[in-house]
């Protein structure tokens, strides 16, 4: 049985979304971030980094949301969440790594230096530079998505789940997204599996 450890409105929504796309059965265990449950021994034994999402499948723990979503895509091939041909998979991984390492990282660095780090560790200029780096990557992503529905290989994939989730976050913190990115984000946000994932997480809280 698959167990997903998560908390609503965090990166665990990506894993829940991917699972809901497959129709797989899974248990959802709330890790209350506000209560610090992710830093307690019981959870650190599963993920020593103390982060969610973490997924455990038959006793095998997996962390990192992009790796989890890819694992789900591989485990449930009928859901077609990852291309099967070599070129399609290359495109999938290219864009998955791009959105995680060139887009999300700058958003997160900016957010940390804006408000999440202890005050004496914040450097406002790093936040400004990171937003600028995010915008550069967003421009490349937008040019890629112009005239396309999906990020890779002309099919909806787990890479879209990760990308849309990053854009949700950017939109939420009021980073400007152009029309192409907004249309792409809004279109995939209508998927019933995302609504089910949000409900599953909210119900657990
Ligand atoms: N790169 C990781 C990041 C995971 C992560 O930072 N998760 C946040 C919630 S969105 C978390 O667990 N934060 C708690 C903490 O860092 O103490 C992933 O994509 O899964």
Image (tube, rainbow, N blue to C red):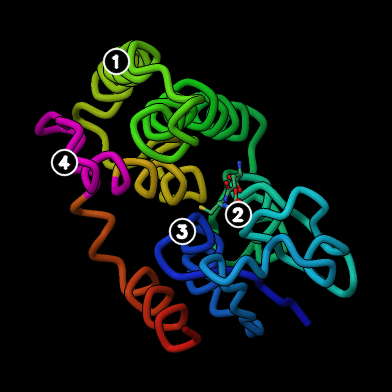
Give the label, 2 or 3, closer to the camera. 3
Dot 1 corresponds to which residue?
Answer: 128
Q: x and y percent of residue 146 in the render? A: 20, 26
State the residue lying farthest toward the left. Answer: 179
Marks 2 and 4: in contact by CB < 8 Å? no
For label 3, being within 8 Å of ligand 1 is answered yes
- Find numbered disc 3 in the image and state the secondary structure of the residue it sits on: loop
- Please name the residue shown 26% across and 34% down the image: 148
Dot 2 corresponds to which residue?
Answer: 69
Q: Is residue 119 above or below residue 40?
A: above
- Choose the circle earlier in sequence order: 4 or 2: 2
Q: x and y percent of residue 104 in the render? A: 44, 32
Give the label, 1 or 3, closer to the camera. 1
Determine which of the numbered discs, if any, sits on residue 182 in the image. Answer: 4
**Mark 4 neighbour class, 10 Å CA radius: few under 14, some 14 to 19, many 20 or more:** some
State the residue lying farthest toward the bottom. Answer: 203
Task: State how far apart marks 4 and 2 are (Cα).
Answer: 22 Å
- Please name the residue shown 61% across and 81% down the image: 28
- Choose the circle earlier in sequence order: 1 or 3: 3
Q: In the rendered image, which quarter is residue 26 located in?
A: bottom right
Give the label, 4 or 3, closer to the camera. 3
- Choose the circle earlier in sequence order: 1 or 2: 2
Q: Please count the marks in the image.
A: 4
For label 4, being within 8 Å of ligand 1 is answered no
- Find numbered disc 2 in the image and state the secondary structure of the residue it sits on: helix
Task: State how far apart marks 1 and 3 are (Cα).
Answer: 23 Å
Task: State how far apart marks 1 and 2 are (Cα).
Answer: 31 Å
Determine which of the numbered discs, if any, sits on residue 202 in the image. Answer: none
């Amino acid at each position: 049985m698959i167990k997903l450890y998560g908390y609503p409105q965090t990166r665990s929504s990506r894993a829940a979304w991917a699972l809901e796309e497959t129709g797989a059965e899974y248990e959802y265990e709330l890790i209350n971030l506000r209560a610090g449950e992710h830093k307690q021994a019981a959870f650190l034994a599963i993920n020593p980094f103390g982060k969610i999402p973490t997924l455990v499948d038959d006793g095998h723990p997996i962390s990192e949301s992009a790796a989890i979503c890819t694992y789900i895509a591989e485990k449930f091939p009928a859901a077609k969440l990852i291309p099967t041909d070599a070129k399609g998979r290359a495109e999938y991984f290219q864009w998955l790594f791009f959105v995680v390492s060139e887009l999300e990282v700058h958003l997160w660095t900016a957010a940390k230096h804006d408000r999440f780090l202890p005050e004496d560790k914040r450097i406002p200029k790093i936040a400004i530079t990171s937003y600028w780096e995010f915008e550069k990557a967003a421009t490349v992503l937008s040019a890629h998505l112009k005239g396309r529905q999906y990020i890779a290989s002309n099919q909806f994939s787990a890479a879209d789940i990760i990308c849309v989730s990053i854009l949700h976050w950017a939109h939420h913190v009021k980073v400007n997204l152009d029309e192409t990115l907004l249309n792409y984000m809004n279109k995939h946000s209508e998927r019933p599996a995302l609504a089910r994932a949000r409900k599953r997480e909210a119900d657990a809280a």
